[in-house]
Amino acid sequence: MNQATVHHLISSKAKEKNPDSLFELRLAANLGLIQQLFHSLYPEEKHSKAFDKLLKLLPKLFASRPEELKLQDLARIKSGNWYQSEKMVGMQLYVEHFNKDLKGLQEKLPYLKDLGVNFLHLMPITPRPKGENDGGYAVNAYYGVAKQYGTAKDLMALTEELRKQNMFLMLDFVVNHTSDEFQWAKKAKAGDKKYQDFYYTYGDDVIPKEFEKSLPEVFPETSPGNFTYIPEMERWVMTVFNSYQWDLNYTNPEVFLEMLTNLVKMVNQGVDVVRFDALAFLWKKMGTISQNLPEAHQLISLFRMCLQVAAPGTIFLAEAIVAPLEIVKYFGEESRRGNECEIAYNASLMALLWNSIATKKTLLLYKSLTSVPEKPQDCTWINYVRCHDDIGLGYEDRFIQEIGWNPHQHRKFLLDYYCQRLDWSPSTGLLFMYNPKTEDGRITGSGASLLGLEKALKENDSKLIEAAVSKIIMLHGIILSFGGIPMIYAGDEIGTLNDYSFLKDEAKKDDSRWVNRPKQDWNIISKLSGKESPQSKIFNTIKRLIAIRKKHPFFADDNNLQLLHTGNDHVLAFERSGKQQKGLLVLCNFDEKPQVIESRWMLKLGYFSKGDPINLVSGEKIIFSSGLLRIKPFEIIWLKKG
Ligand code: GLC
């Protein structure tokens, strides 16, 4: 039975005002798969008690859900997939950089509403170690609030207010690892065998060395290797990310049960979407790269099926920054199609957009995206330009080769282009985790700086400023129209530049991702309605595009996206055609010169049947000359069928 059918059955049977009926219905729908997944992950006889524990745990978890949230679950199940709506527009932000703390954030809700944002992703707010803590991704607790953000009460007040304003909240669940100060890690260090088994710990380095033969390194510059020796415990522990982030051992079902409990406590604070952090890494197997393993998928599905029973209105976002063909698998495959995460980051689109900016061409984007199978009907993307992390260059070599480029040289070019190694490039990005031996690396920098605004402002070059502003608007126009939830990175709506202050902070200076974790500039924001500046142009255009998106149902994600070939390599074209609705054609020029495309195929699609159509972005009529349509440098056109 697919998710839509289950949804339908549940919504028709769930009694009007009795949310408790949801538990029985969900359990009945999910139990078969829960059982199958659990036994497949934990087949040994010794684990049968753990399954009994799970069966006892589920009703307790549901009972712990606040009544108000249960009522909301019921309403959501009846109203369908809110997360695919054209009304959804997100913003990712660091609470402390946005406006000091949770209370400060709440004060700024009118700003977000004015822009049109109704979905917030708050970067980790849970307790973490002092000093280095990977921006809060080293967790000392899975729920509650670190002092610097305020109190648990402040969080409850915020989530209550968000519900009142019909806004949605996403928080991280750092499911793959804890900090080395987490209570389990502390007990493990003190010699408690039970908790040593919550992690991958070893008395000598024999097994770690075997693992290392096939494990890649996530942070080779700052945290080489995948294991750390802990003198207090006289054991090695697996630390795939930083040495202070201990990987949880999910081959132990007790870890799953405890983490499920933590997850439910976290969402019961009023969380709508769980960002399942680094989920590709959840299962480890010697001799493999220990990413995207089938068991990781089963485990995610098991979490999902159980969370649906315990907190039926909450959904999952997959943070799988992996190859395009691997990402779609996190929506669930075959018998589990639609049974893993409802949302996934469209990391492929993001990385391909950056490739298109640097090369001014869209061929690699077409080749890569058209090779990916269609996602399930009930699932959607988060489309984004920038986030707090680096930009990886994980394109498929075969597609780069098909275009006639050398994959190694091409990646080197992208690093050179973005990371200030080419005089003529407008970009002022920084290298991240560069390995001089292999010349591999990743890119960091704020969206505006990567797109040339920093250099243009410094040189006071009005043409370059205009080009950078157009590029910023074009990329945001794409994420607003591509199908899925657009997620704006706080500050990008006003063209925020790189923030170099991290270089002065001992705990941050070695992690160049901090260059793109800036403070929200309320001084600039206070002047947005004044005279035209690059910032006000960016803000006011993005705001206008958001308002347009919200007015037209074809922006809702109904798997109604089709990439179209225009015959011009500089142009990206796609159509969003609602089933019974009128469609939208999106055209973008990645070149610094005007480009033309033939109008014949647009006529065939029915875009010019009644007079000259309007470009929703500029508000102007589209004019043809000699059967050709001209697109300005870095222009985005939203063409609505007449
Ligand atoms: C995710 C986060 C990243 C963090 C990593 C380890 O990828 O986005 O910032 O470093 O997980 O938790």
Image: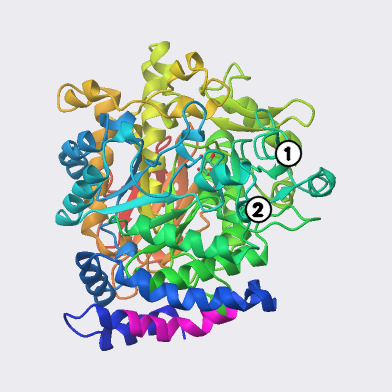
Protein image colouring: rainbow
Observer-nearest of 498 and 405: 498
Position of residue 131 relative to residue 22, above or below, is above
x, y percent for residue 280: 60, 55
Distance between the Cα atoms at labels 2 and 1?
12 Å
Which labelled disc corresponds to residue 193? 2
Task: Decide whether residue 15 is among the magenta residues.
Answer: no
Q: Nearer the viewer, residue 481 or 614?
A: 481
Label placed on residue 259 = none
Left or right: 608, with 241 as reference point: left
Residue 410 lies left or right of residue 244; in this view the side is right
Please name the residue shown 18% across and 53% down the image: 160
Residue 231 vertical placement versus 252 (above, below): above
What is the magenta range?
Answer: 23-36
Which label's residue is closer to the chain start, 2 or 1? 2
Instruction: Please identify the quadrant where the C terminus is shown.
Output: bottom left
Tag 1: amino acid: Glu
Location of residue 180 (image quadrant): top right
* Relative depth, front residue between 1 and 240: 240
Q: Main secondary structure of the magenta part?
A: helix
